[in-house]
Image (tube, coloured by chain):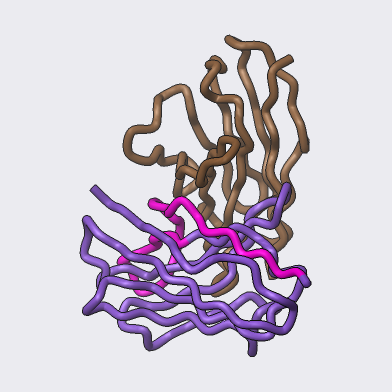
C-alpha cells in the first residue's frame, strides 16, 4: 500500500497570505495525485487532479505541482472561504486509493 | 446536475449489519467506477471500496474484506454497501463518490453528503 504523508498537520495563516501544503508518497505515484478541500460539516470537494489540473470551477489561486513522490498544493492568496482541511489522494497504485492524513488551514 | 444521495446509516450494535444506499442522478451512472469513502469522527478520509462500471470488479480496503460487500444496480442508478459483523472502529460518515469512466478508478469528482454509521452497544 502507498502511504501518503501530509505536512504540516496544521497551518495558521492570515487572509491574503500565500500557502504551501506538502504531500509525500511512500513510493512513486507518477502524476496520479488529486487534492481535495473539506470544510467543517461538508463533503470533500475535488480541487486538483493529475497533480496540476484544476477541477471544474476551481479558482486560479489554487495550483498543484510535483510528480513521483513529492507534491505541493499552493494557494496564492488565501481567502476567508479557503479555511478548511486539505487532503491529497493517490490513484496510481490501485486498487487501494489512499489519502493523506490532511492539513488543516486555520486563521492565524 | 450530478447528485449522489446516501441513506441507510444509523445506530447498530457491534456484530450487527447495515445496508447503505446511494441514489445517483444527473449523469450516466453505468459509465462510472463508483466508490465508498468513510471518515471516522474527527479523522481523515479512508477509501473503503470500489466497483467497476459493470460490477465485474470490486476492491476493498483490508480492514473490511470479508465483512463488507459493494454492489450496484445500473437499472436503478444505485450503489450499495452491505456491512456485516460491524465493529466500533467502523463508526464513520460514509460517502458515496463518483470516480472514473476509464478502465481503472482515479480521482473522485462528485460526492454525496454522507450518512453516519454508529456502531455501539
Which residue: 45% across, 49% down? A50
Which residue: 46% across, 22% down? A61
SS assignment for the magenta stretch, majority: loop
x%, y% of residue B15? 72, 84
x%, y% of residue A84? 61, 31
* Tint applied to chain A in the drawing: brown
x%, y% of residue A71? 62, 42
Q: For residue B106, which quarter of the picture?
A: bottom left
Which residue: 55% across, 25% down? A82
Which residue: 53% across, 84% down? B69
Q: For residue B108, which quarter of the picture?
A: bottom left
**Is residue B86 shown above or below B110?**
below
Q: Quadrant of the N terminus of chain A?
A: bottom right
Left or right of A1? Residue A83 is left
Q: Foreground residue, A15 or A68? A: A15
- Where are the magenta residues, as a range? B96-120
**Is residue B99 shown above or below A1?**
above
Magenta residue check for B30: no
Q: Foreground residue, A43 or A10? A: A43
Q: Foreground residue, B86 or A82? A: B86
**Is residue B78 shown above or below A31?**
below
Q: Quadrant of the C terminus of chain A?
A: top right
Q: How many marks?
A: 0
* Tint applied to chain B in the drawing: purple
Left or right of A3? Residue B36 is left
**Is residue B36 shown above or below A20?**
below
x%, y% of residue B42? 73, 47
Magenta residue check for B118: yes
Left or right of A100? Residue B83 is left
Amino acid at each position: 500500500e502507498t502511504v501518503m504523508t501530509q505536512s504540516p498537520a496544521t497551518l495558521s495563516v492570515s487572509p491574503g497570505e500565500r500557502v504551501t501544503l506538502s504531500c509525500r508518497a511512500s513510493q512513486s505515484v507518477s502524476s496520479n495525485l488529486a487534492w481535495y478541500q473539506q470544510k467543517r460539516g461538508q463533503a470533500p470537494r475535488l480541487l486538483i487532479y493529475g497533480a496540476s489540473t484544476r477541477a471544474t470551477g476551481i479558482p486560479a489561486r489554487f495550483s498543484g505541482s510535483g510528480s513521483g513522490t513529492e507534491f505541493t498544493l499552493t494557494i496564492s492568496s488565501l481567502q476567508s472561504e479557503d479555511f478548511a482541511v486539505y487532503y491529497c489522494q493517490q490513484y496510481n497504485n490501485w486498487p487501494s486509493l489512499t489519502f493523506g492524513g490532511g492539513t488543516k488551514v486555520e486563521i492565524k | 446536475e450530478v447528485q449522489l444521495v446516501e441513506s441507510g446509516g444509523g445506530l447498530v450494535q457491534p456484530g450487527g449489519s447495515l445496508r447503505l444506499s446511494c441514489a445517483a442522478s444527473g449523469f450516466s451512472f453505468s459509465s462510472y467506477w463508483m466508490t465508498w469513502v468513510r471518515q471516522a469522527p474527527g479523522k481523515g478520509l479512508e477509501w473503503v471500496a470500489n466497483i467497476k462500471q459493470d460490477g465485474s470488479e470490486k476492491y476493498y480496503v483490508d480492514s473490511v474484506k470479508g465483512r463488507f460487500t459493494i454492489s450496484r444496480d445500473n437499472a436503478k442508478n444505485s450503489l450499495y454497501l452491505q456491512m456485516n459483523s460491524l465493529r466500533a472502529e467502523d463508526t464513520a460518515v460514509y460517502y458515496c463518490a463518483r470516480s472514473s469512466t476509464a478502465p481503472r478508478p482515479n480521482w473522485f469528482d462528485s460526492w454525496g453528503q454522507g450518512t453516519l454509521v454508529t456502531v455501539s452497544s
